[in-house]
Every structure is written in C-alpha cells, then in structure tokens.
Image (cartoon, rainbow, N blue to C red):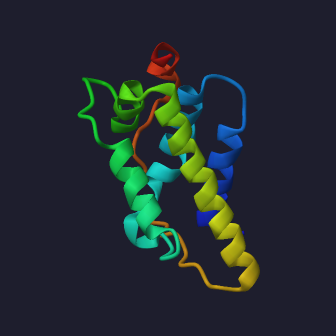
Amino acid sequence: MCQFSDKFYTAVSTLSGGGPIKTRLIAAYGENLDLIADEDVPDIIQPKFESLRAKMHAIKPLTGESPVLAAVRKMSATEAAVCASHIVTMFSELVRVKTTGERLRPLRHDAAQPDFDAGRDAASLN
C-alpha cells in the first residue's frame, strides 16, 4: 500500500476507535490527511478531498489552535460524523481503485509537516 493510502488507512482506523467523534476526527484528519498536498490527491477523490479540506479549514483558529481544531470545535457532532463518513468513503474509493489496477500518484516526501497537537484542546470539544 502506498504512503498516501497508508495515511487514509490510519485516519479510518482512528475514526473507528473509541471516544467522541469530534476528538477522533481531529486526530484522524489533523495527524494524517491535513499533511497531504493537494497535487498528491488522486483524481478519483480530488473533489471530495478538496471539499473536506475546505470544511476542515473554514474557521479562523484562536491563538494556539490549529485550523482543524477550530473547524471541528464549531461543528455539531452530526457534522463531524458526516466528515468522518466522507473520509471512510474516500478510503473505500482508494481501495476500489487499488484493486482495479489504476495507478495512484505517490505522496511527495518533501511536504512540510505542520505542527499539530491533537490532544491539547480536543477534550473540550464535546
């Protein structure tokens, strides 16, 4: 499995774990998918990924807060669950593409790694 698919797999694994959905979404997206450059996203999921990225960066963060944390803080639990569902759907599309033999573009190794502290304010979101 390529590094791109690995990031989605890890995100889906995080989403399927225990705890509040908002906390799981912050960790799943912030620690895995937020690190992916737009040009590295396969065409098959590009529109869904761009839409999710826009939602996850829609709110101006407070001091010391990541954009992802700010966006999820403002979401209802239902909105967070919808975002989580979109991540699972994109992963399933990647698996389908992998089984058909369609090639995925590799993830760039020179992408900047933003600083993200998922545990800091996540507990206060619910």
Instruction: Look at the image and tell me whether residue 2 can be seen.
Output: no
Q: In the picture provided, is 67 more to the left or to the right than 2?
A: left
Q: Could you say which quadrant of the image residue 65 lies in?
A: top left
70 or 109: which is nearer to us?
70
Percent position (x, y) of residue 88? Answer: 63, 52
Residue lying furthest top: 124
- Position of residue 62 relative to residue 95, above or below, is above
Quadrant in which the N terminus appears: bottom right
- Position of residue 38 relative to residue 34, above or below, is below
Q: Could you say which quadrant of the image residue 24 lies in?
A: top right
Percent position (x, y) of residue 23? Answer: 55, 27
Q: In the picture provided, is 47 more to the left or to the right than 93?
A: left
Q: Residue at x 38, y 60 (%)?
A: 50
Q: Residue at x 61, y 84 (%)?
A: 103
Residue lying furthest front: 78
112 or 86: which is nearer to us?
86
Q: Residue at x 51, y 27 (%)?
A: 77
Percent position (x, y) of residue 89? Answer: 61, 57
- Position of residue 55 relative to residue 97, above or below, is above
In this figure, what is the number of numbered marks?
0
Instruction: Look at the image and tell me whether residue 62 can be seen.
Output: yes
Q: In the picture provided, is 87 more to the left or to the right than 92?
A: left
Percent position (x, y) of residue 36? Answer: 46, 59
Q: Residue at x 51, y 52 (%)?
A: 33
